[in-house]
Image (cartoon, rainbow, N blue to C red):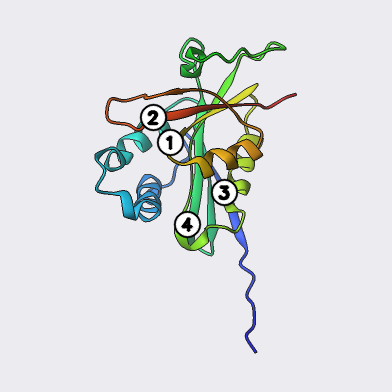
Amino acid sequence: MESSVTRVIDLRYYGKGSLPEGFKQMLIDVHADAYADAMDDEFNQRFPWFVDHWSEMDGFTCVVAFDGEEPAGFAYGAPLQPGREWWRSTEFEPNNGYTETYAVSEVMVRPQWRKQGISDRLHEALLNECGEDLAVLLVDVTHPKVQNLYETWGYEKVGEQRPFADSPVYAVMVKRLHP
């Protein structure tokens, strides 16, 4: 008879100015594992640049899921500065005075920890820490299952855009945080 082991996934919070040594490399290593089958794509190879960019933004927050001391996944983002809300080029019209936006840049879980609800926990924990009115994120349009997952979390697709010449086309998704 096999015994089942319940893993306890510990969520740890980080913010700009309190990042431990090796933190950025940990995110890069998790990304390399999560995208192991797509690392020949030049856009995916630029992930270290994105880690540097986002982790230096004011208000940067990150939640990392650990299985013991092994990072299983993470979610990070930062508030967008007024006038720099890239999603405003869409047809979406926020109502009820929604003005401040938190951009969810990444939600990723390593393959061996997928399908356990970890991405949902990471995403929820990340947004629980922010005080903005809206959350916004991008989803590769060739990944409809991921887009559908975000829709179950309360996001709606409001347009499409290609933020970089070598990036995929993304669905722009927005979620009202304070109904």
Secondary element under disc 4, as helix, strand or loop, is strand
Q: Which residue is mark 2?
A: 169
Q: Which residue is mark 4?
A: 71
Q: Amino acid at mark 1?
A: Asp
- Give residue 116's position: percent from left, percent from top: 60, 59
Q: Amino acid at mark 3?
A: Ser
Name the residue at the right extreme. Answer: 179
3D distance between C-alphas at marks 4 and 1? 24 Å
3D distance between C-alphas at marks 3 and 4? 13 Å
Q: Which residue is mark 3?
A: 119
In the figure, 16 relative to 32: above or below? above
Between label 4 and label 1, give the one nearer the viewer: 1
Name the N-terminal-most of marks 1 and 3. Answer: 3
3D distance between C-alphas at marks 1 and 3? 17 Å
Secondary element under disc 3, as helix, strand or loop, is helix
Q: Amino acid at mark 2?
A: Val
Secondary element under disc 2, as helix, strand or loop, is loop
Name the N-terminal-most of marks 3 and 4. Answer: 4
3D distance between C-alphas at marks 1 and 2? 6 Å
Instruction: Check if mark 3's residue and mark 2's residue have beta carbons within 8 Å.
Output: no
Between label 1 and label 3, give the one nearer the viewer: 1
Q: Which residue is mark 1?
A: 140
Name the N-terminal-most of marks 4 and 1. Answer: 4
3D distance between C-alphas at marks 4 and 2? 29 Å
Name the N-terminal-most of marks 3 and 2. Answer: 3
Q: Going by the image, does 62 lie left or right of 165?
A: right
* Figure quadrant of the C terminus: top right
